[in-house]
Image: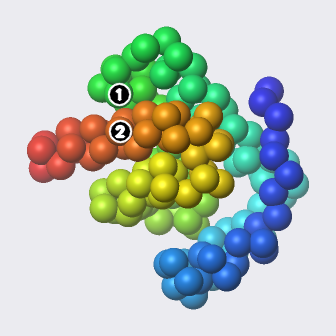
Amino acid sequence: MHAVPNFHHDDHRDEVVDRWGEAAWARSNGWWSKLSAAGRAEFLGEGVALKNEYLEAKAAGLPVTDAVVVALVERHRSWIAQGWGGVEPTHEQFVGLGEMYVADDRFARNYGGVEGATFVRDAIVAWVAAHTESR
């Protein structure tokens, strides 16, 4: 089991409202409020697992199109949807999150710095490109 970060959902209210609007906050907060302590720990633990597995994939030299990395991106997208109260991010939103991981040091540090965050962003971009072409 990976260590779960000390996370306070309400600390992010103003930023969520500023970036994505009151409805996004209400949906996410409603979902978060209904989670048990075990559910919250499971959700946060999955986030830590994803971050660690991205770092492992990068360290192993896997390309962002490798099946292992693609599976990570798909788990990541599902994890985001869970945190968004069941709403899956659009392709544009998903890529935007990847860009934010690189541009915002708070996120980049979770992925081992800008280089790690760039790997995650590039994996997301590759996944979106593959899923956009097939439509």
- Which numbered marker is on residue 64? 1
Q: Is residue 39 above or below residue 89?
A: above
Q: Is residue 77 above or below residue 21?
A: above
Residue 73 percent across, percent down from the top left: 43, 38
The residue positioned farthest toward the bottom in the image shown: 22
- 131 and 12: which one is in front? 12
On the rendered structure, is 73 left or right of 131?
right
Q: Amino acid at mark 2?
A: Asp
In the rendered structure, are the residues bearing label 2 and label 1 in contact, judged by CB atoms less than 8 Å apart?
yes
Look at the image and tell me whether residue 132 can be seen: yes
Q: Is residue 97 above or below residue 121?
A: below
Quarter of the image with the N terminus in it: top right
On the rendered structure, is 117 left or right of 69?
right
- Tag 2 residue: 122
Instruction: Say what secondary structure mark 1 lies in.
Output: loop
Q: Amino acid at mark 1?
A: Val
Determine the residue positioned at 30% across, 57% down: 91
Determine the residue positioned at 69% across, 78% down: 13
Determine the residue positioned at 53% across, 29% down: 54
Between discs 2 and 1, the one toward the N terminus: 1
